[in-house]
Amino acid sequence: MLSSEERLNIDKLLNIVNIVDTLSSIPRVGWVQRGLSKFEAEDVGKHILLTSYVGLSLCCEYREICEDKDVNCDSVVTLCLIHDLHEANIGNISGNVRKLIPNFRQIELKQLEELLKDYPKYIRQYVGMKFLNYRESKSIEALITNIADKLSTLLRALSYYLRGYRQVIDLIHNYTSEVVRLLNYIKCSEFREEIQNILHQFRKFLS
């Protein structure tokens, strides 16, 4: 049986409010770099929510067209919800800067651990295990989550492009390439073709 110290309490639950508020106050730097104001730019919290909905949609699609009911959509949504959780501690850092920082992935993991240090051990272990699953992309659920992450950014970029922010075009090209790269790890050809068809539909908006 868990001791009182090991259980959730009101302080720990209130801290979730702080984490959500923090994530919702951090603009994604890629949008700001391309001319959107901090008020217009998508924040990390919105990105996590969008990724979760996209991930759920992709997972349901995968289960249906690949006839694979073993794929766990609950796990996909969980991975989507935590995939950028560490940014509540370190903020949103551009990809170019990440490449300059040695062992940046280890830093992110350490910051996730720091963020959850006051939570019960069973929560820390569960979230840590899921986060590593997402990072290593060894399961189909993790692959779907990674595709959802990139596709949600691509969709957001397209929405800005259609509002007149033409300077996001490089992100549209970059994230299209990222989704295509990730599809190479998907064994189900029907799902690959489905996502490739969605990417093809982007072109009509860019002409």
Image (cartoon, grey):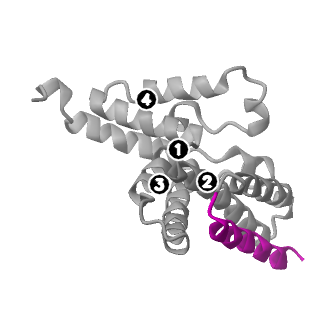
Quick one: label 2 or label 4, which is nearer the N terminus?
A: 4
Residue linked to disc 3: 76
| Residue 7 drawn above or below residue 146 | above
- Callout 2 secondary element: helix
* Crowd band around label 2 with a 10 angstrom C-alpha radius: few (<14), some (14–19), many (20+): many
Residue linked to disc 2: 149
Q: Amino acid at mark 1?
A: His
Residue linked to disc 4: 115
Left or right: 20 in relation to 66 = left
Q: Position of residue 174 (x, y in %)?
A: 81, 53
Q: CA distance from mark 1 to mark 2?
A: 9 Å
- Callout 1 secondary element: loop
- In this view, the residue farthest toward the top is 102
Q: Position of residue 139 (x, y in %)?
A: 52, 47
Q: Position of residue 64 (x, y in %)?
A: 50, 74
Q: CA distance from mark 4 to mark 1?
A: 14 Å
Q: Amino acid at mark 4?
A: Leu
Q: CA distance from mark 3 to mark 4?
A: 22 Å
For image coordinates 83% across by 74% down, the residue present is 203
Q: Which-is-in-front pick, marks 4 and 1?
A: 1
Q: Amino acid at mark 2?
A: Asp
User: From which residue to which does the magenta span run?
Assistant: 187-207
The reply to whether the C-beta atoms of the residues labelled 1 and 2 are less than 8 Å apart is yes
Q: Which quadrant is the C terminus positioned in?
A: bottom right
Along the line of sight, the residue nearer the viewer: 199 or 171: 199
Q: Amino acid at mark 3?
A: Val
Residue linked to disc 1: 83
One can see residue 39 in this view: no
The reply to whether the C-beta atoms of the residues labelled 3 and 4 are less than 8 Å apart is no
Quick one: label 1 or label 2, which is nearer the N terminus?
A: 1
Quick one: label 4 or label 1, which is nearer the N terminus?
A: 1
